[in-house]
Amino acid sequence: MKTFYYKIIKGISVTFIHLFLLSASLTCLFPLFWMVRSSLMTMDTIFIDKSLIPHTISFSNYIKAWVDGNFALYLWNSVFYTVTVVFAIVIISSLAAFAFSRLKFPGKDFFFYMFVAAMMIPLPGSFVPLYVLMTKLHLVNTRIGYVLCMTNVGLSMSILLLKTFFDKMTPDLEDAARIDGCGKLGIWWNVGLPLAMPAIAVIVIFNSLNVWNEFILANLLLNDSRLMPLQKALMQFQGVHSINYPLLMAGLTIAVIPIILIYLAMQKYIIKGLTSGAVVG
Amino acid sequence: MVGGNEVIKKKIFNRDIITNYFFIIPAVVIFSIFYIYPFFYTFKLSLNEWNGIDLHQQFVGLDNFIELMRDKDWWASMWHAWYITMIALTFQNLFAFILAFACDRDLKMKNFYRVVFFIPPILSEVVVGLIWTWILYAGKQGGEYIGLLNYTLSKIGFSHLAHNWLSDPKTALTCIAIVHSWKGFGWGFIMFLAGLQTIDRQLYEAARVDGANMWGILKNVTLPMMIPVIAVVVILTILGSMQAFVLIMSMMGNELAGATSVPVTQILNSMMATKRFGYACAQGITFGVILIFISVIFKKVSDRFKEV
């Protein structure tokens, strides 16, 4: 009898837990649903049709955003910046982390703690001197300028993460490679990088999201509309088409779809990566 | 033989030092140019009056900092950021903790919840801000509200509540804080859940055998074990929320001053609108020092808790 009551009480409480969690899920998903729903309407129907699923669905906003709104170009720009910056960060930070973990040279600790200290000290207005510097170097409105700035942003965290990872690895395989006549660069490339793949995956995910979603530096450094990434383009788009919300929602959907797809495909690694990144940072 | 080996080793080592530096040179060069130089340049600029274009920078000593102490707009913006932070610390983190606590058991669809709650945190602030601006939109067409929130309110009989959420200084900041919390709670949830899952189940069993109810277990077992995780979440929430600004810009447009200004918008305003680069740097340094100060206090407080 006792277990019977226990089961009923447990069943009720589990139902309540699910109701609670489901309503929280709805809170997360509904704004996104509303974005997609509004993007499938036009300026004529959006004021009249108030149903959850519009009576007439139109893809004209996507065509308009893609062709007239130049979103094909902005999407390409965002992909370009993300891929270039993440590639640069992986190569540069893994070289440095490998050296900090495995090689000996004077001033090693000094250089390493320099990177660590940079992560500890918040400097909220750092974009001001950075903008001045970029103007001096004539790197404003250049792809390379933005790529270099963003590479620097992700460097400290990636070096720290990879160094901790290399420190935990046993040097057996590296010794074997050395006996086989591998140089240091060869060991980094043939042994270090393949073994550090779990840490590199975290770095790739963390920095990809960071670059894809970045706005502040893009806003300051890239005024040429041919160079803009999606985030800046969306912000400008809102300024110009402030009333045409269906069109804006189509632009937003274009910016969100790649992120959501990649997220759903790799959610396990992303959640793990972002939490470990947050703990380190 | 041993001696010979050592000589060879030493020779290799000497040659090594130079090649070893090649590994860190790319990182150090980029870091020096784009982090260290701007870092120290901030301090130099903060002591000068400069419009960003002239070749000459006027040295003014600590005048920028003294002026900042009396700048009412600056301290108002600090208060706005603190208001957003307080809402994030209380509502967002409490909600995140309750969700994590609810999820921390054998539950069907646990992974579904995890995946869904983490969607807002991976979206950019621009995207989140613009979606919510549309939901909060206050425009009318033919006497009916267009924006979802106002339309729903007027349909369920609360039309007196419907108004221009983002133009009204009384509600704008709260709306921003709520949207900020919407974007952030999934992150808190993941952090808390990760922390909860490290707690040994046997502790719960032991407490249950001792006759503790759910509240007792939460108070005496879960919370004490969670203090390190809570401390990390609190400090990161403070650092993130105080510096939140892109969300505000995407919701308020280019209106950087007024009832929703935060320190970062003030810095941007000094730089782009009034063209006072020195003053902007003084603001950045002051804000940075305040952030470090707050984090240190919270670290101390959480350490105190840990001892108890």
Image (cartoon, coloured by chain):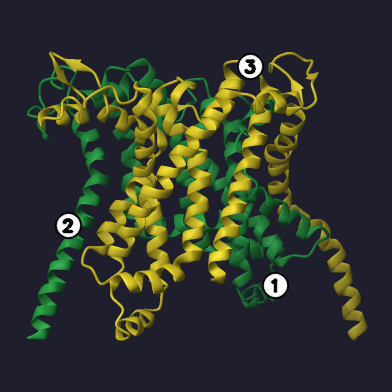
Q: Which residue is mark 2?
A: A19
Q: Give the letter of the green chain.
A: A
- The answer for which chain carries disc 3 is B
Q: Establish whether labels 3 and 1 are both on one chain.
A: no
- Residue B225 position (above or below residue B179): below
Residue A75 image offset from top left, x and y in percent: 39, 32
- The answer for which chain carries disc 2 is A
Q: Quadrant of residue B190?
A: bottom left
Residue A199 image offset from top left, x and y in percent: 52, 61
Q: Which residue is mark 3?
A: B275
Alpha carbon separation for disc pair 2 and 3: 53 Å
Residue A116 image offset from top left, x and y in percent: 67, 54
| The label number, if any, that marks residue A129 in the structure image | none
Q: Give the letter of the yellow chain.
A: B
Q: Which residue is mark 1?
A: A178
Q: Residues within 10 Å of mark 2 (few under 14, many from 20)?
A: few
Q: Establish whether labels 1 and 2 are both on one chain.
A: yes
Q: Establish whether labels 2 and 3 are both on one chain.
A: no
- The residue type indicated by label 1 comes to Arg
Helix, strand or loop under label 3: loop
Nearer to us: label 2 or label 3? 2
- The residue type indicated by label 2 comes to Leu
Helix, strand or loop under label 2: helix
Q: Quadrant of residue A65?
A: top left
Residue B61: in sight, yes or no? yes
* Lower sequence index among marks 1 and 2: 2
